Image (cartoon, rainbow, N blue to C red):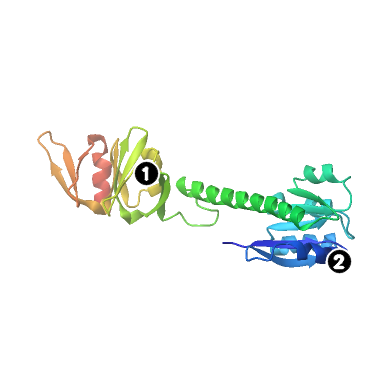
Amino acid sequence: MTKLRIIVADDEPLARARLISLLPKDLSIEIIGEYGSGTEAIEAIRRDKPDIAFLDMQMPGCDGLQVVGGIDPANRPAVVFVTAHDKFAVDAFGVRAVDYVLKPFDRERLETALERAAEYVNARRAGDLSARIEGALAGIAAPGTQRPERLAVKADGRYVFLKFDEVVWVEAADNYVVIHTTAGERLMPRDTLSSIESRLGTQHFARVSRSALVRIDQVKELQPNAQGDYIILLRNGIRIPLSRGLRGRFEKFLVEG
């Protein structure tokens, strides 16, 4: 389990100590810093990137709202405001704080706030992971990185990551494609053959018909048929017709390879 990393910012040392003492003492959270001013809190958030920040509304240097305003929204932690005054509540939720706790508070109220913050963090982590997976499924490389060397697909409710050399051939099947692997597995993601083709690239794969794509090093023979066309024989014994319209491109690819 990834720990929830927490900072506490309050200009009153006793208030900070009480808040920290009421947080659960378990392995799921870690207090990584406590600060006495808003300025210190901003520096800590930018530097340490905590998951959750408990912020007093009124602090020297800058107040809690200014702390939140000084952090890029993409890098903001889950914020719980802790204050003796309820007059700031509307402003607090205007900056999307996950909770607003009035002093004096008890352990139960603070744990409720922590649970809400944890739910926010976990939802965001899940969203980030989903975005990374969806990027992989779309074949999107992060800026400054090389093209992915794996094919990511969602099939049967699971995400599967295949090395390119694990793919033997791919065929279209209505609104799905069937990916045949070297292990003999058949994966059926809801996708198009054109999408799979663009993600695999043209260095090792070639389109042989409107409905089939093969890995070149899996081709064993090209066999002529009675109509003057060719049948592609794969190393696993599968036979696939070679489209006449794609024959020239395919044969050129083999020669260059």
Q: Where is residue 248 in the image (x, y as percent from the top left)?
A: 25, 41
Residue at figure coordinates x 68%, y 58% from the top left = 51
Q: Which of 50 and 24 is in front in this view?
A: 24
Q: Where, by quadrant of the figure, is residue 229 drawn? A: top left
The structure residue drawn at horizontal position 73% and vertical position 62%, both measured from the top left corner, is 23
Q: Which quadrant of the figure contains the N terminus?
A: bottom right
Q: Residue 65: image x %, image y %?
A: 83, 51
Left or right: where 30 falls relative to 137: right
User: Upstream in the sequence, badge 1 or badge 2?
Assistant: 2
**What's the residue type where badge 1 is placed?**
Glu
Give percent across and percent down for residue 46. 73, 60
Residue at 86%, 46% (x, y): give it.
88
Viewer-side residue, 107 vs 101: 107
Q: Where is residue 25 in the image (x, y as percent from the top left)?
A: 68, 66
**Image height check: is 68 above or below 197?**
below
Q: Does residue 51 appear in this view?
A: yes
Q: Residue 197 carries which label?
A: 1
- 160, above or below 6, in the image: above
Residue found at the very far left of the displayed protein? 226
What residue sits 51% from the left and 57% below the top?
A: 145
How far is disc 1 from disc 2 in space, using C-alphas? 63 Å
Q: Left of 125 or right of it: where is 171?
A: left
Query: What numbered label is drawn on residue 14?
Result: 2
Instruction: Mark 1: give few (<14), some (14-19) or many (20+) Cα within 10 Å.
Output: some
Quick one: SS at disc 2?
helix
Q: Which residue type carries mark 2? A: Leu
| Figure quadrant of the C terminus | bottom left
Mark 1, secondary structure of its residue: helix
Left or right: 1, with 210 as reference point: right
